[in-house]
Image (cartoon, helix red, strand yellow):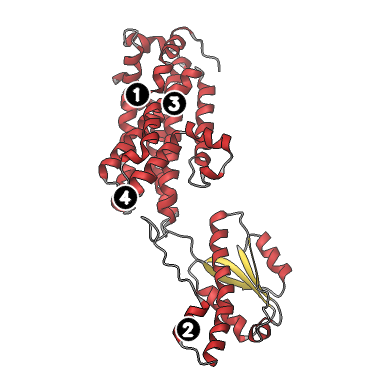
Amino acid sequence: MLREMRILWKNHIFGFCMVVFPIAVMLFFTSLLDEGQPAELPVGVVDLDNTSTTRALAHRLDAFQSSKVVARYPSMAEARHAMQRNEIYGFLYMPKGTTEKLLSARQPKISYYYGLTSLTSGALVMKDLKTISTLGSAAVGQATLRARGATDAQIQSFLQPIRVDLHQVANPWANYNVYLSTVFVPGVIMLFIFLITAYSIGVELKFGRSKEWVAMADGNMLVAILGKFLPHTLIWLAIVFGYEHYIYGVLHFPHEGGAWTIVLLSLLQVFAAQGFGIFVFGLMPSLRMSMSVCSLWAVLSFSMAGSAFPIMGMDAPLQSLSWLFPLRHYYMLYQITVFNGYPLLEAWFHLTALAFFCLLPWLVIRKIKNAMLNYVYIP
């Protein structure tokens, strides 16, 4: 352990990858989404009718929190070119005669166009544009019914026969910071753990210190592994617990599961990531190959965790493959126990899977010892 602490102190790669970069990633993601949702996304309007009714619709669109009308275009071609130049995320098209057809109940066609190159911004702009299209017909219908002597209750029941009473579980603000930072930041931290774990074993071969390392443990590879990674574990736990305190204590992210569940999840996150890194190096005792596999697995974890695209919507082979990623089980444990507050029994499979990742080094510990004693480092 003391030997490893000296190595950590002398090699600045460890300091940057274990402390500086994780803290920078933590602050970057949480500050990037500090407003909760993207606001005032630029949109455009093509108003060929140019009446008080269509101008009122454009004004209402500009009043939405997510959208901001930044330009009015004389034609669809110019609005489309503006979208292609990434100047706007979408635009509302109101053809000539829109107001006349509205007032005469001839169903005018109002079109809206949006891009999903950026999934979040495209979805938010689409929601606002769709709402505006609905409000246009509702305003005319309200005026017509009021002219016929209908009461406000009758108008409301006619225009909105079913009223939606929406209650968003655990995150009523629809704060994207709560949804995204709680999987992106742990995923990046696990990526660093994968890489540093494989790297710290690989450099023993690279610098010809492997036999010395095994000899200090009297040939007991379990003692060698525990002594090497105990300082790593303490540093990673300090980083992870600091992150948990930051998001739950400072930023006040919702955590229905309580403190002990968070502590257990943090411990499993660190131990499972280290176990996976040791296991990968044991499978292929090469510094270059083990770090390449660890980086590839960590990057794929963001897609296979289920936060960006639901796992049940993927093909069956990909659904089965998702169980091989520690971040997937971490994310499910977080969603079930911390975010929604269900008991650990509801997530027993994911808890067992993370515990299995922690024990993976047992499968390759003899191979690692053989590599340390007999392998020759090949750049």
Residue 204: x and y, percent?
A: 43, 17
Residue 166 location, x and y as percent? Answer: 42, 64
Q: Amino acid at mark 1?
A: Phe
- Mark seen at residue 229: 1
Is there CB contact under 8 Å for labels 3 and 2?
A: no
Of discs 4 and 1, which sits in the foreground?
4
Query: What is the distance, in whole Å, between disc 1 and disc 3 at their CAs?
Result: 11 Å
Vertical arrangement, residue 314 with respect to residue 136, above or below: above
Q: Mark 3 — residue?
A: 277
User: Which residue does the numbered mark 4 point to in the structure image?
Assistant: 255
Q: Is residue 333 above or below residue 93?
A: above
* Real-space Cα separation, disc 3 to disc 4, in angstroms: 29 Å
The amino acid type, in three-letter code, at marker 3 is: Gly
- The image quadrant where one finds the C terminus is top right
Q: Which residue is mark 2?
A: 154
Q: Quadrant of the N terminus?
A: top left
Dot label at residue 155: none
**Sooner in the amino-acid sequence: mark 3 or mark 4:** 4
Q: Residue 340: give x, y in percent of width and height.
A: 35, 49
At x 50% / y 35%, what residue is drawn? Answer: 322
